[in-house]
């Protein structure tokens, strides 16, 4: 869990699709690591946003800007030919899907790990009720891995999608990372985003069971997913 950064590229998964155009503006990753003692009173395995996080950057007076329906965004500036073509390339293939909903929705399909030490692991989201007490991942100490996310954006452009990942061990917060994924337009094909390399800690004290909470929200502080999970770090054989 060291030296992790968010990847700057995001794009649709490979394979057959509807042929719609896609675009995303990846943001430059920003990580913060804190060794903080904090009681872990969360129950792992819940994907719902609980909205009770303490955020040091939170501004109680924050008011989100007004949302503009996607269809209205397409119809604006029609006299600008180059801008109109760009919008149609970006969003035109979804015009038949407009349903009047303005709020963007990010629907996460899977979370995975890509590592040289083991085969690629992919866990479907949301986590099935019967698996909520299981380890989402089992890693070896000192392993290099990259986190992989698959998600779909619906209804409207999601701006400034960010993530935060907080990890506890033995009732104490031991790690926290934050980063920017970027801005994504709606499209039928899922986006696949791979974060930069991270490394699990090593040593006797590093081995054992961890609980964690992974949260995604946008510029308007809409929480699109909160995943509480557990994982294990084992001795390298």
Image (cartoon, helix red, strand yellow):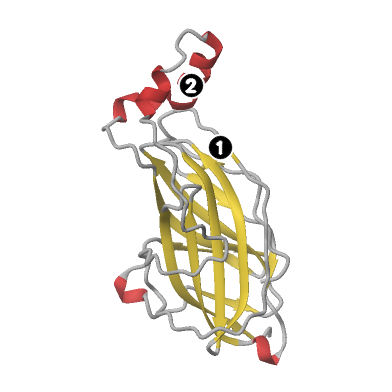
Instruction: Say which of 77 and 148 sits in front.
Output: 77
Disc on the earlier residue, 2 or 1: 1
- The picture quadrant where one finds residue 196 is bottom right
Quadrant where the N terminus lies? Answer: bottom right
Q: Residues within 10 Å of mark 2 (few under 14, many from 20)?
A: some
Residue 230: x and y in percent read 48, 78
What residue sits right under mark 2 in the picture? 87
Height in image: 49 above or below 202?
above
Residue drawn at point x = 29 percent, y = 37 percent = 101
Q: Secondary structure at mark 1?
A: strand
- Residue lying farthest front? 61
Residue 211: x and y in percent read 50, 79
Answer whether labels 2 and 1 touch (C-beta < 8 Å): no
What residue sits right under mark 1 in the picture? 24
Residue 163: x and y in percent read 54, 58
Tally of marks: 2
Instruction: Say which of 66 and 233 sits in front.
Output: 66
Q: Residues within 10 Å of mark 1 (few under 14, many from 20)?
A: many
Instruction: Say which of 192 and 120 sits in front.
Output: 192
Q: CA distance from mark 2 to mark 1?
A: 13 Å
Residue 26: x and y in percent read 61, 42
Residue drawn at point x = 64 percent, y = 79 percent = 140
- The picture quadrant where one finds residue 172 is bottom right
Quadrant where the C terminus lies? Answer: bottom right
Q: Secondary structure at mark 2?
A: helix
Instruction: Say which of 108 and 28 sits in front.
Output: 28
The numbered mark at residue 134 is: none
Height in image: 25 above or below 231?
above
């Amino acid at each position: 869990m060291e030296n992790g950064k968010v990847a700057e590229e995001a794009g649709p998964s490979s394979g057959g699709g509807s042929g719609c155009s896609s675009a995303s503006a990846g943001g430059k990753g920003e990580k913060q690591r804190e060794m903080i003692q904090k009681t872990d009173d969360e129950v792992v395995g819940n994907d719902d946003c609980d909205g009770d996080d303490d955020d040091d950057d939170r501004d109680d007076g924050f008011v989100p800007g007004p949302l503009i329906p996607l269809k209205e965004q397409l119809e604006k500036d029609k006299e600008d030919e180059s801008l109109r073509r760009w919008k149609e390339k970006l969003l035109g293939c979804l015009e038949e899907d407009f349903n009047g909903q303005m709020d963007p929705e990010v629907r996460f399909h899977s979370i995975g790990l890509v590592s040289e030490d083991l085969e690629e692991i992919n866990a479907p989201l949301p986590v099935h009720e019967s698996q909520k007490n299981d380890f989402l991942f089992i890693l070896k100490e000192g392993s290099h891995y990259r986190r992989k996310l698959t998600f779909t954006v619906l209804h409207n452009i999601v701006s400034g999608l960010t993530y935060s990942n907080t990890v506890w061990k033995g009732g104490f917060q031991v790690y926290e990372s934050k980063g920017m994924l970027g801005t994504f337009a709606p499209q039928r094909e899922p986006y696949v985003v791979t974060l930069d390399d991270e490394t699990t800690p090593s040593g006797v004290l590093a081995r054992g069971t961890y609980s964690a909470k992974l949260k995604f929200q946008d510029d308007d502080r809409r929480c699109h997913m909160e995943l509480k999970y557990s994982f294990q770090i084992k001795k390298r054989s």
